[in-house]
Image (cartoon, helix red, strand yellow):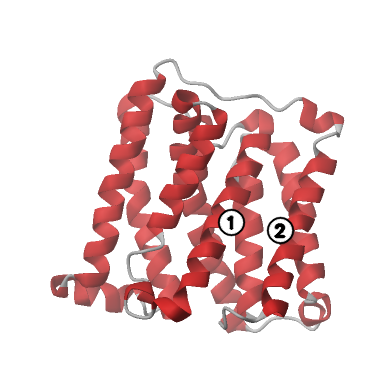
Amino acid sequence: MNPTDLKYWLGYLSEWLGVIAVVMIAGISPMFKKIRRIEFRYPRRDATFALIVFAVIFFFAFMFFTNPVLESLREFAGAFPDGELSQRMFIALIAIVPVIILLIVRGQPPKSTGWSKENTRANLTLAVMLVILVVFLRGKFYTLLQGISTEQGSLLLVVLIWCLVEETIFRGYIQLRLMSFLGTTWGWLATSLLYVLWQLPGNPVFTDFGTEWPNLIIALVQGLLLGWIMRKTYHVAAPAFLRAAATWLMLL
């Protein structure tokens, strides 16, 4: 991507502003007035566990991309559609294991990771609205009406798994706990920063900063936007499906 390509940045800006507008309009619906906040009895303790989880999975991600011993694991993970994305999906699936273990050990329900039954209907409705918006802004309606190939369908599956799992970890497990401890705003901002750091393992930004730095800016804005939606909805569905749709359509 050319950092000086104004048209490219304007495309992203229009999409981000469109998402914000849809979320704000949806927020005045009676359906969204029933959204239930999620709090924790021991916010400091839960925030500590969230930061420990991030440290562990961040270390694993760096080792995955740099340790020669894990070369066979990288090759296996890259065998699925779009090798780089399938590797990210594989890392996410491994990264959610400590989250699941902690939930079981501490007896915490799925809603503590942003999968609350009470908030599901409103969030799935919002998710559909956001996906339609992204399809429209990307100009992909005609492409989708023509049908997708088996390869594109497989890529969609990889992207869906990747985004659902990562959003469960970041917007669900980590952000909810940091918001409970640090407050809504600081917890949201802290999680967005951790999300940007999460992009560094395997990222060529260290060797090609001049070309790759815009991707970090996009990741920061994406993290802030997805986290903001989580603040509004207290559910992972809308951020996850929005991110999955935007990623997949970009690759079509």
The CA span between labels 1 and 2 is 9 Å
The answer to whether the residue labelled 1 contacts the one labelled 2, judged by CB atoms less than 8 Å apart, is yes
User: Residue at image x 48%, y 61%?
Assistant: 162
Q: Nearer the viewer, residue 220 or 71?
A: 220
- The residue singled out by tag 1 in the image is 221
**Residue drawn where x is 66% and y is 43% of the image:** 229
Where is the C terminus found, in terms of image quarters? Answer: bottom right
Q: Quadrant of residue 100?
A: top left
- Position of 251 with respect to 135 (left or right) is left
In-front residue for pair 63/183:
183
Q: Residue at x 46, y 43 (%)?
A: 191
- The furthest residue to the top: 41
Q: Which mark is residue 16?
A: 2
**Residue 47 visible in this rendered orientation of the protein:** yes
At which x and y percent is residue 76? 30, 76
With respect to residue 193, does 40 lie above or below? above
